[in-house]
Image (tube, rainbow, N blue to C red):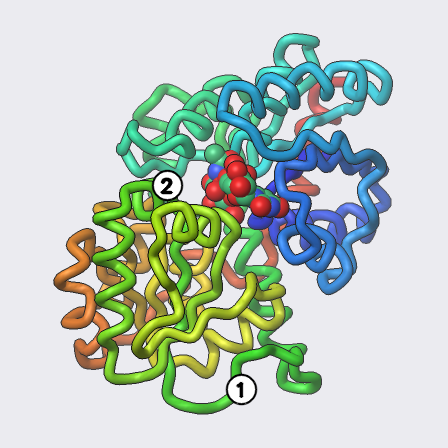
């Protein structure tokens, strides 16, 4: 059983669903309903050809505790009814944490995909979600050697397996398919521009900080396409901060193919998204990450990605020369999902 609920989890689900089908594994998919807008949810299922979830709990938005608690209560009868051999929790959202707590409470084996990532910033909701999920899991499926190191340091080595990064699987396949059929993005497939996304509470919720980030982007000498997450739209409206100013053109949240196409063509990426930092790195597009730290530390090598928490330093980072050093392959070759399914099958058999 896969449990997903938020946009990045749908991207990770795609290669897992395809690998499960290829291996003949029965795969029950639960959507918690954490994300529900068409552009935040359904478009990913359509475009990445993910089977429609077997059940959607329709939980929707709420405070952290209320949202997580509702999911936990609603997941229990579903897990009790299906009794899967494994529950697979994805990443670090509130849907991840609810999945983990529910599975361990009713003694269903739990595997955590994207285990071992750490920001070491306990102010981030994702950090609690991922630490608690790793420590609940029977099997920690790590994307990188660095993640394996964190799991070892926390005493979890015996339950941890390095499988690679499933987002790399879907990214490489999508980049390949875009060569034959463009995505129909609102952003031109060529040109000189920056792609920006800002959605984290640390950047959107304080009006002074959000205004400083918007002002820095607005002063860019090249066009900035800002793909606006619903949280950014809601918070900027609440704080009365105009987003479409100066160099900024706002666009709605992009579909996955639209995003990959736009990043491939972009001069630079400015983001606070974990997934997008890595996607830009894999596509060879320099990135500025508007955060004090990153879980994807491999992207920082040779300054392909730079951490800039101070908005007044944003444009200087964007204008730095493009790195010339080659990028290694710290995220694998694009076959992680098959490894995940194989690991789950082997671990299940060894318990029989
Ligand atoms: C969640 C994840 C975050 C991930 C992000 C990707 C948690 C704690 N955070 O953050 O790790 O990077 O997803 O997008 O789980 N909203 C809509 N429509 C939607 C979804 C959300 O309008 O379909 C609005 C609502 O006002 C909601 C707000 O966005 O309150 C935030 O949504 P929520 O799911 O709570 O967290 P994200 O910020 O999306």
Question: Which mark is on residue 189?
Answer: 1
Is residue 248 or residue 120 the one in the foreground?
248
Could you say where residue 276 lies in the image, as x and y percent from the top left? 44, 60
SS type, badge 2 = helix
* Horizontal side, residue 294 vs residue 265: left or right: left
> Foreground residue, 148 or 133?
133
Residue linked to disc 2: 201
User: Can you name the residue that lies furthest to the bottom here?
Assistant: 191
Mark 2 crowdedness (10 Å alpha carbons): few <14, some 14-19, many ≥20: some
C-alpha gap between disc 1 and disc 2? 30 Å
Mark nearer the N terminus (1 vs 2): 1
Residue density around tag 1, few if under 14, some if 14–19, many if 20 or more, within 10 Å: some
Q: Is mark 2 within 8 Å of ligand 1?
A: yes
The vertical placement of 262 against 198, above or below, is: below
- Report the residue at 43% width, 91% height from top: 191
Q: Residue at x 42, y 75 (%)?
A: 249
The answer to whether residue 75 of the structure is visible from this angle is yes
Q: Quadrant of the N terminus?
A: top right
Judged left or right of residue 126, residue 69 is: right
Question: Image quadrant for the C terminus?
Answer: top right
Pointers 1 and 2 in contact (CB under 8 A)? Answer: no
Q: Quadrant of residue 317?
A: bottom left
Q: Residue at 19%, 57% (x, y): give it.
A: 308
Nearer to us in this view, 76 or 167: 76
Q: Is residue 218 above or below residue 190?
A: above
Task: Point out residue 292 in the picture as x, y percentages from the top left corner.
Answer: 21, 46
């Amino acid at each position: 059983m896969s449990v997903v609920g938020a946009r990045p989890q749908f991207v990770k689900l795609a290669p897992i669903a395809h690998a499960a089908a290829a291996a003949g594994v029965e795969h029950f998919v639960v959507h918690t309903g954490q994300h529900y807008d068409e552009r935040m949810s359904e478009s990913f299922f359509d475009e990445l050809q993910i089977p429609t979830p077997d059940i959607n709990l329709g939980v929707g938005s709420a405070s952290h505790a209320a949202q997580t608690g509702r999911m936990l209560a609603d997941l229990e009868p579903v897990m009790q009814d299906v009794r899967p051999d494994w529950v697979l929790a994805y990443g670090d959202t509130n849907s991840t944490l609810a999945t983990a707590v529910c599975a361990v409470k009713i003694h269903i084996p739990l595997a955590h995909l994207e285990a071992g990532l750490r920001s070491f910033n306990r102010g981030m909701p994702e950090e609690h979600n991922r630490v608690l999920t790793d420590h609940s899991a029977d099997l920690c499926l790590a994307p990188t050697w660095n993640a394996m190191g964190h799991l070892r340091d926390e005493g979890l080595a015996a339950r941890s397996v390095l499988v690679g990064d499933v987002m790399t699987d879907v990214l490489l396949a999508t980049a390949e398919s875009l060569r034959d059929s463009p995505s129909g993005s609102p952003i031109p497939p060529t040109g000189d521009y920056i792609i920006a996304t800002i959605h984290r509470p640390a950047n959107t919720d304080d009006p002074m900080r959000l205004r400083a980030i918007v002002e820095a982007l607005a002063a860019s000498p090249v066009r900035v396409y800002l793909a606006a997450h619903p949280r950014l739209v809601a918070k900027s409206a609440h704080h009365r901060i105009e987003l479409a100013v100066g160099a900024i053109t706002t666009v709605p949240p992009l579909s996955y193919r639209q995003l990959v196409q736009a990043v491939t063509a972009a001069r630079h990426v400015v983001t606070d998204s974990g997934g997008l930092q890595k996607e830009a790195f894999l596509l060879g597009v320099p990135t500025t990450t508007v955060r004090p730290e990153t879980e994807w530390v491999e992207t920082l090598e040779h300054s392909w990605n730079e951490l800039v928490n101070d908005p007044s330093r944003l444009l200087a980072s964007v204008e730095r020369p493009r790195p010339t050093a080659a990028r290694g392959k710290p995220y694998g070759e694009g076959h992680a999902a098959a490894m995940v399914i194989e690991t789950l099958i082997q671990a299940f058999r060894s318990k029989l």
